[in-house]
Amino acid sequence: MKKISLYILMMVMMVLISCDETESVTFDPIGGQVAISFEEAFSTITIPEAGTTITLNILSTTKTGADRTIPVSIDPSSTGAAADYTVGALTIPANEHIGTLDVTFDNFDGMIDCDGKTLVLNIESGSDAVNGPEQFTFNYTRDFECPDLFLNIEFDDYPGETSWTVTQGGTTLLSGDDYSGDPIMENLCLCPGDYTFTIFDSFGDGICCAYGNGSYEVVFNGNVLFEGGSFGSEASNDFTIE
């Protein structure tokens, strides 16, 4: 019985040594299957005037004795212009499980302020990914100068009760809460469009005038769009940035 066990152990060791000479499997959950994937699935970035290069990590379940270059394709669902970016080579160095892919965005003048685009990349490794996504999505926009749009709030005696949001189509884009009492003047960095500003008071008595003379206003290019202070639980104002 001991001889049989020893024989089996020797055979297993020979197989492991043989595998190690060609490629070593470390974190493959499906018994040695080769798989290549992105470490993450998406990223949201803002492109500066000087351009930017993003390096993506690529994971491999195996490693080999030579450098590997894996094909990458641009998915038809991408909405960005081909001139916006340059996709480098996906390379995994010899004896490594992690490689990289550089993507450069440098077409600043060809982009439009606040016009969001996507670049969707596919790994064409010929095998299923078992350790991460085979597709990566960039959501990118051109960096732009925020408009001269400010929210000013003077709090009442209970600033912790006050919060606010700026929404567009039901999506909250900006918000603020947990205030200590000092007045705020916050630049609202918004693209052209239609928005709703809502201010809340958790106690339901507004910010003026029973417990202090609080007030709020939103100012665009030096002009007050709306203001207030006396309300119940909340007050909303629609406004447009052109």
Image: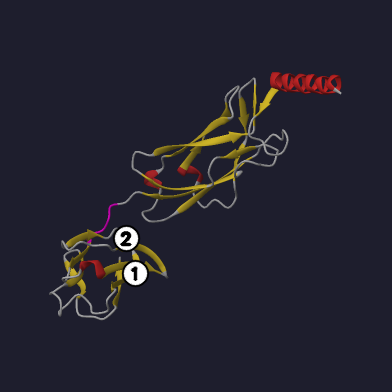
Residue 147 in view, yes or no: yes
Query: What's the coloring here?
Result: secondary structure
Q: Residues within 10 Å of mark 1 (few under 14, many from 20)?
A: many
Residue range corresponding to the magenta coloring: 145-149
Relative to 186, residue 27 above or below: above
Position of 202 with respect to 23 (left or right) is left
Magenta stretch mostly in which secondary structure?
A: loop
Q: Hey, which quadrant is residue 205 in on the image?
A: bottom left
Can you identify the residue that label 1 sits on?
195
Residue 112 is covered by the magenta coloring: no
- Spot occupied by residue 222 in the image (x, y as percentages of width and height): 16, 65
Q: Earlier in the sequence, mark 1 or mark 2?
A: 2
Q: Amino acid at mark 1?
A: Tyr
- Spot occupied by residue 113 in the image (x, y as percentages of width and height): 36, 54
Asked if the residues shown at circle 1 and circle 2 are in contact, with their CB atoms under 8 angstroms apart, the answer is: yes
Quadrant of the drawing holding the C terminus = bottom left
Position of 43 with respect to 176 (left or right) is right
Element type at marker 1? strand
What is the number of the mark on residue 190?
A: 2
